[in-house]
Image (cartoon, rainbow, N blue to C red):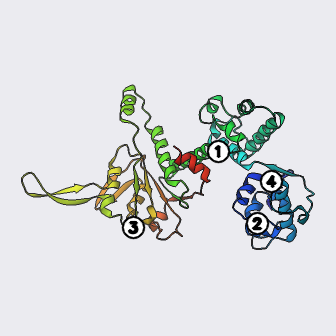
Amino acid sequence: QISAQFPDHMAGVDRDGIDAILKTMPALKHPQDLLVNFWPLARYMAPALADCLPATFDEPPAHRCLGKMAAIIHSIFPEGGMKADLLPVLNDNIHPYHGHRLRLLYDALLAFARDSHDRGIPVHQQAMVLNHQLSAITQCHPSEPTLQLEQHLQQQLQHCFPEQLLTTSLQTLATDWLQASHGHKQQQARRLEQLIAMLNKHKIIELTGPAGTGKSCLAVATGQAIQKQQYSPKHWLVAAICAKLGQQTVKTLTLGPNTTWEYLYGSVTLKKNRFGDLASYSVPGQLTDWAKSSQPGLLVINEANLVHHGLLSPLTGLLQSPPRLCVDGQTLCLTEKHRVLLTGNPDNYLGRNLDPELKSRLLRLYYRPLPQSILKQAIIEP
C-alpha cells in the first residue's frame, strides 16, 4: 500500500540492515531458509519486493517472493552459501545503499534541525539528498587517501550545517559516514534532544524498554543537560563557585520491592536529647528532600515499576495546579522546575507493574535497544 502511494523509482535495498540480520542466521543454502526472518528482511528491501509481498503478515510468502528475496541477497552478497542456479534472474535494477549512512545523516539533521540550512524541507528528504551527494563524491574520488576524501565530504557537509557545528558536535560526521558506522553520537543527541523537549511539556515521563536499552544513562544525561540550561551562571562569581564545587549531580534513586515509605518520604524517630530526655526527630526522605529543594533539577527514579502500589502515588501531585507533594498530612509546594523521569522494564517482565494511579496520568515512552557498538562507545569505553 505504501509503495502504491509513494512509488520508489529506484529499487533501493539497505545492505547494512540485511547484513545485520544475516549475521544472526546460519549459512543459507535454500530460499526457504529465509522464511523465519522474512518480514525483518523485507523491511530493508520493500521497494524491490513490492510486487510480490503477501497481503497480510499472517499470509506466508509465495515461493516466487522468497526466490526474489534470495536473488537480491545473492546479488549483494555473492559469497553467501546459496547457489546461483537455484535463484531466479532479477529483472529489476537493484540499487544497494548503506542504511547506516542514511540513518546517520537523518539523526544528525534531526538532532540539529534548528541549525540546518534547509529547515523548510522534510528531514528524511534532506538526508536522502545529502546521502546521494556524499556517495557521488566517493565515486568521483575512488583512489584518494582517506584524509583527502574526508575533506571533500566535509566541504559538502558545509552546505547543510554551520561550520561551527562541524567543528564541535558534528566534527566526526564525515569520518563516521565514510566508515558506515551507526553514528552513536548523533543518535544519542537525537534522543536527548527529543526527551528534553518532551520534559518541557510533561512533568513526569516513564522510559520503558528491554534491559540494556540505555534508559538510565540517557536519563542522567538528560538531567545534566537540563541543569546546564537552567543554571548556567550569569555572574563571574557564580561561575567561579560552580567551577570550584563542580557540576551539581543529578539526583538518582534506584528502587525495588523492598523500598519503604520511610525511605522515600521520611519518618519520625525518638532520640535522647542533650538533657537525656526522649525527643522526636524527623528523618527526611529522598523524595521530600528533593521536593523541598529550591533548585531541584530532574529526579531520576530507576526501576520505578518494581515498588509496591501506592508508594509513588504522591508524585501525581506534580501534575496538579499548583504542583505539590502531599505526604503524611503535609503539603509541600513544588516549583515549575520539578520534573521526574522514571525508568523500568516492560510490564511483561516478572514483577513489573507501575502504580496504576501514576501510570494513568504520565507519558510513557518505549525505547528500543541500541546496537551493541553504540552501547560500547557511549557507555563502556568512556
Q: Position of residue 258 (x, y in %)?
A: 36, 66
Q: Find disc 2 in the rendering and name its residue.
A: 38
Residue farthest to the left, as pictured: 275
Disc sitting over residue 13 in the figure: 4
Report the Cα–Cα distance between label 1 and label 2: 27 Å
For residue 349, above or below residue 284: below
Q: Amino acid at mark 2?
A: Phe
Image point 40% across, 27% down: which residue? 235
Image point 89% across, 61% down: which residue? 84
Q: Is residue 208 left or right of residue 321?
A: right
Which residue is more in the foreground, 373 or 65? 373
Q: Is residue 303 left or right of residue 192?
A: left
Front tag of 2 and 3 = 2
Task: Residue 288: name its quadrant.
Answer: bottom left
Q: N-terminal of the two: label 1 or label 4?
A: 4
Disc sitting over residue 257 in the figure: 3
Rate crowding at label 2 as few (under 14), some (14 to 19) or many (20 or more) other CA atoms within 10 Å: some
Picture mark count: 4
